[in-house]
Amino acid sequence: MMRVFSSAISSGRARWTWGDGVALTTITAFLYFGVRMALRAPAAIEGPTISLSPAMLPLYAGFSFLRMLTAYVISMAFSLWYGTVAASNRRAEQFLLPLLDVLQSVPILSFLPVVLLGLSAFFSQNLASEFASVVLIFTSQAWNLAFAWYQAQKTVPRELSEVATNFRFSPWLRFRTVELPFAAISLVWNSVMSWAGGWFFLMAAEIFTVGNKDFRLPGLGAYLSEAANAGNVQAITWGLVTLLSLIVALDQLLWRPLMAWSDRFKLEMVETEDRPRSWFLEAWRRSRVVGPGIRSVVRRLGQPLEKKLDRAFLTESNSEAGSKRHVWPSIFMWVAGMVLLYGMYRAAAMLFQVGAAEWQLIASGIIATALRVFIAMLIALVWTLPAGVLIGMNSRIASWAQPIAEIAASVPATALFPVLMLGLITVSGGLNLIAVLLMLMGTQWYLLFNVIAGAAAIPEDLRHTASALGLKGWPRWKIAVLPALFPYIITGLITASGGAWNASIVAEYTEFGGRTRSVTGIGSESQKRPPLGTIQCFLRRP
């Protein structure tokens, strides 16, 4: 590697630019934080003791970032596999899509004790807590990525698929050159949303305690919780500044460069005049000393891996082309069907024990929660549709609006709950309004980021054609904008509605001012009759 860099420096054409300074500074910073985390890691993992010293914040931020990154890598791998299976097999699609929709609506916070209890049977408490935090973050990141990848698989233009078929692209080549580039814009924007939603679940995982059992983890969430319990305003300020700084740094050093890079895959006949830009990406492109060395190293390391993946995909394709082409999907469907039938049998046996009065409560709770979810989705659609189109079609507005949206989406909605309670508790119907607003604040971002992705993917020639035809106002939206956004709107509504159902467990039942306050809904009923009471009692034991 050093030989590559030295040859690049000795070349007469290589001259130092400001991009080289940015690139070398970035590499040095990563090496410094990596060494510092490696040296300080043992002391931080010894126990749940959280130091409020500002000097520990870089270490805690590093731990939180690594948990988020691990969950994101697993989420992306799961999404690519799950979406591909659902899009390529009609039988699997009929089962996998409803399953995914149900899973994203399950309030995972209620089942965190189950995850911890199961993992604690195999691992130590610290390791079980780490795995549980990754699982919890995974559940907040995977669903919208899987839906986005599935949507991209189903909407690949027919001419691109025909070209790949006619030129006999291998499955790996088809994935790398057709499917992944076409889905790049949607995946990048949904990745931003996944990270924004993941911050909330990360905070919840890092401060989780049950009775006298302490499952806290060293990280920003535990730091902020400890500072709040101690009433240390200075520590809270430092913690919030660190969290916001990390979010802004990720936006400038990762998401903005990825958005600018993914814009090259937009399908259009006319080149866009106002493309998204990133100063960090431009710096790396302008680097004439570091850039060639990095590209050479990546090429040398990537070519063997790419050949292995190509051979693996080709072997799988040849095996599927034989007589056993549909054997494994059929076996999977049979096994899943048997498990589903057994689960339905057990569920029916339990449901027969529920009395008529409780069924009425459950039915009224489902209807009330569904009505709140519908109202929250309607409000979200009204404002996110024009705002998303404005941000997605104007890179200048996106350069400052997208970081603000990412920061706003990363703020846990439950953190604003006391403010809503103080302001609306005395208003008639205030609890219902608070529940709707809490659902809205936690789910509207899924719809916004999907609309932004769809607007950013609208071809420039379509915009020029609409302008040439004199389409303005509603006719422009009806003929050009809405049809192009329709798949993204559906994906956003599905993921947002799942998040709203998930938020119902917090929005409809809470303790405030020493009193328990609740409204009619399935979320409040599940809190009044927790299904995990026995497990929670077990965890409370010393």
Image (cartoon, grey):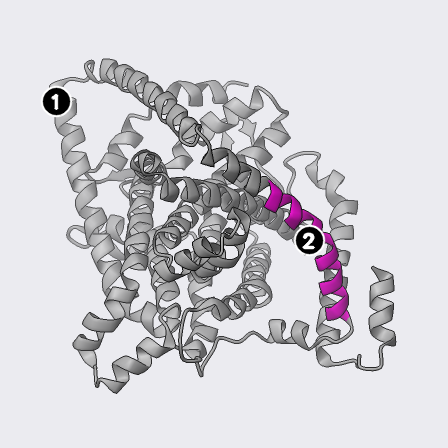
Q: Does the stretch in magenta take in 292?
A: yes
Left or right of 480? Residue 69 is right
Residue 117 x %, y %:
51, 23
Label 1 neighbour load within 10 Å: few <14, some 14-19, many 20+: few
Numbered circle sitting on residue 357: 1
Label 2 neighbour load within 10 Å: few <14, some 14-19, many 20+: few
Front residue (pair 497, 19): 19
Front residue (pair 245, 100): 100
Please, what secondary structure does the residue beneath circle 2 have?
Answer: helix
Residue 344 x %, y %:
27, 20
Numbered circle sitting on residue 302: 2
Q: The magenta stretch spans which residues? A: 290-311
Please, what secondary structure does the residue beneath circle 1 have?
Answer: helix
**Residue 201 visible within the image:** no
| CA–CA distance in space, label 1 to label 2 | 63 Å
Q: Does the stretch in magenta take in 75?
A: no
Residue 284 x %, y %:
67, 72
